[in-house]
Amino acid sequence: MRLSFVELPESVVPCRNLVGGEWLLPPGATLLDVRSPYTGTVIGRVPLTPADGVAQAVEAARPAAALWRSLSARERTQPLFRFRSLLERDLDRLSNLAASEAGKTVAEARAGVLKGLEVCEFALSLQNLDSGAHLEVSRGVTCELRREPLGIVAGITPFNFPAMVPMWLFPIAVTLGNAFILKPSEKVPLTACALGELMREAGYPPGVFSVVHGGRETVDALVEHPDVKALAFVGSSAVARQLYARGGERGKRVLALGGAKNHLIVAPDADPDLTAQAVVDSFTGCAGQRCMAGSVLLAVGDIEPLLQDIARRAARLEVGPGMGAIIDKGAVERLEAAIARAASEGARLTLDGRGKRPAGEQWAGGNWLGPSILDHVRPDMEAARRELFGPVLSIIRVPTLSAALAVENASTYGNAASIFTTSGAVAQAAVEGVRAGMVGVNVGVPVPREPFSFGGTGESRFGHGDITGVSSLDFWTQLKKVTRKWSARTDGSWMS
């Protein structure tokens, strides 16, 4: 159904699990309606897979994993070349599908698919890049490093990036020789099914890539299953912490990315035009529903004209075509309540997005909140500390860069931070002083590009390493060290 700025599915899409190369409805599964955040209409139905449905998928993946790991890296890479081409072919369809179920603008959804495609390209390089190591360490003795897959691994992904976050995970994991089970958010199952169909079309053997839909019971079953050797998760910090602890207790490898409260530090010498637009793009992009959103602006000194420009630009942003919808009505209510609490605690609401929605009755059932700005927020307030996950910017005024860094370092999160300045010395001081794992200089959304990896610190990441790039290779594989000696030598060494 084509609307003015997004195309929804023509009819309700029945989602199924991809198990052993076949689309199956798990027996005994409850079906959940999938509603578009844009209109509130039902666009799909998704099964909530019970534990025996998860076991079915793992059972189908077991022989596939054994066969897949026996192939060379070059052989495992060939289907990914085809998958990449299919992504390009279906870019418009995937973009509209992701937008329709996640509430993104089509342009944002398209950018997410393209970022996923970038990770595919990195995975394609692994056949030449990841060559291991071989060295003569002593006379007649060599040591070799071999990278071996773990077996069956799983990814548990959030609603806000239906295409991108899954593609952060499975192209690398599969190319390294693992069988991968994707458990997408039950709020956005349609894009996951489309990706599964493309993996089938690309020629991956049945069971190498699986899709299992569901909620908490499904996640619990993946954590409990002894044959699932590793879990990657992206979501809230509370769930990430629990998943990391439970997986670790069961001997699994777990990397769980949590939430964020990212800080945008604006110095008095910041470029006005660059900074104002970057701040607005950062806190309103994806309607603020991303872990990289700059949700706290640390205003250093007197930058009043710049703050006024930020408010003007945000106020001009058109809800709908310029900024998408919120995922569900519960999230809207939570955000509106947080704005009201901040105002009651003394923050000044300089831009109120409550009640904003696109013109036209077709959008009346959607989940809408316009850009909102809270000024004179104190560091101890909820709006300064807790991840709100919406298009809400909290402004904290500080006298110096040192005071700004103190606020940033006090956060329990440590995902991302940015400094806006025209001074190299100020930029360097901020880069060295912030605690966050990803830092931007005059960049509002400092997402690293491949092969540089994505990942934060503190309560934004539970586990070792990062989820993409070179750092991800050690997560998805086991290093085997081989020491060889073929004959005795007359000259001595400690290994003779």
Image: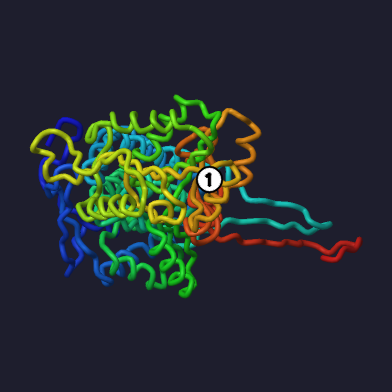
Residue 56 x %, y % = 28, 67
Give whichever of 285, 36 is nearer the camera. Answer: 285
Q: Vertical placement of 45 versus 97: above or below? A: below
Q: Residue at x 26, y 59 (%)?
A: 213
What residue is drawn where x is 57% and y is 47%? 403
**Residue 144 drawn at (x, y percent):** 68, 56
Q: Which residue is mark 1?
A: 438
Please determine whether, in this image, residue 383 is positioned above or below residue 323. Answer: below
Can residue 212 be seen?
A: yes
- Quarter placement of the C terminus: bottom right
Q: Which quadrant is home to the N terminus? A: top left
* Near-viewer residue (187 or 229): 187
Expressed as whole percent of the image width and height from the top left, the position of residue 257 reads 44, 56
Residue 419 in the image, given as x and y percentages of width and height: 54, 38
**SS class of the residue under badge 1?**
strand
- Which residue is located at x 72 percent, y 61 percent? 484
The vertical placement of 487 against 194, above or below, is below
Pick the residue in front: 279 or 91: 279
